[in-house]
Image (cartoon, rainbow, N blue to C red):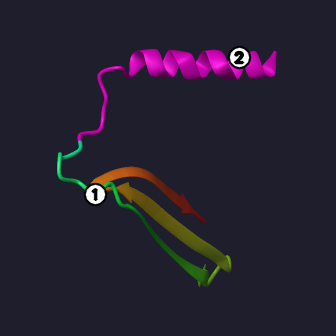
């Protein structure tokens, strides 16, 4: 039941975003590049760390993450 509900949610999202796409140049080499950075306990009061990163496929940003 849980998985079926999740799959339905994914399909509804995909159906609602058919107008979105990524554009690639013909001469693009499709190089996958990732950038990440982190600090250890950068929040001096709470002693929490922060990290983040992103992935590019060619010149297109395809994913990113940020975590505290």
Q: Quadrant of residue 48?
A: bottom right
- Which corner quadrant holds the N terminus? top right
In what element is the residue under mark 2? helix
Q: Which one is closest to the eye, mark 2 or mark 1?
A: 1
Of pointers 2 and 1, the one earlier in the residue sequence: 2
Residue at the spot 23% in from the left edge and 54% down from the top edge:
28
Disc 2/disc 1 C-alpha distance (Å): 38 Å
Measured as percent of width and height from the top left, residue 57 is found at 36, 54
Residue at the spot 17% in from the left edge and 52% down from the top edge:
27
Q: Quadrant of residue 19?
A: top left
Local packing at callout 2 (Cα closer than 10 Å; few below 14, some 14-19, many 20+) is: few
Examine the structure image and report whether residue 10 is included in the region drawn in magenta.
yes
Local packing at callout 1 (Cα closer than 10 Å; few below 14, some 14-19, many 20+) is: few
Residue 43 visible in the shown view: no
Q: Quadrant of residue 46?
A: bottom right
Residue 44 lies, with reference to residue 15, above or below; the image says: below
Measured as percent of width and height from the top left, residue 58 is found at 30, 56
Measured as percent of width and height from the top left, residue 45 is found at 64, 81
Examine the structure image and report whether residue 60 is included in the region drawn in magenta.
no
Tag 2 residue = 5
Query: Which segment did they paint magenta?
Result: 1-23
**Nearest the eye: 40 or 32:** 32
In what element is the residue under mark 1? loop
Residue at the spot 52% in from the left edge and 60% down from the top edge:
66
Q: Is residue 51 left or right of residue 16?
A: right
- Which corner quadrant holds the C terminus? bottom right
Tag 1 residue = 29
């Amino acid at each position: 039941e849980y998985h079926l509900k999740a799959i339905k949610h994914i399909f509804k999202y995909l159906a609602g975003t058919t107008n979105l796409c990524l554009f690639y140049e013909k001469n693009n080499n499709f190089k996958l590049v990732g950038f990440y950075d982190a600090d250890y306990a950068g929040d001096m009061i709470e002693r929490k760390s922060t990290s983040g990163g992103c992935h590019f496929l060619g010149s297109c940003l395809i994913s990113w993450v940020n975590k505290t």
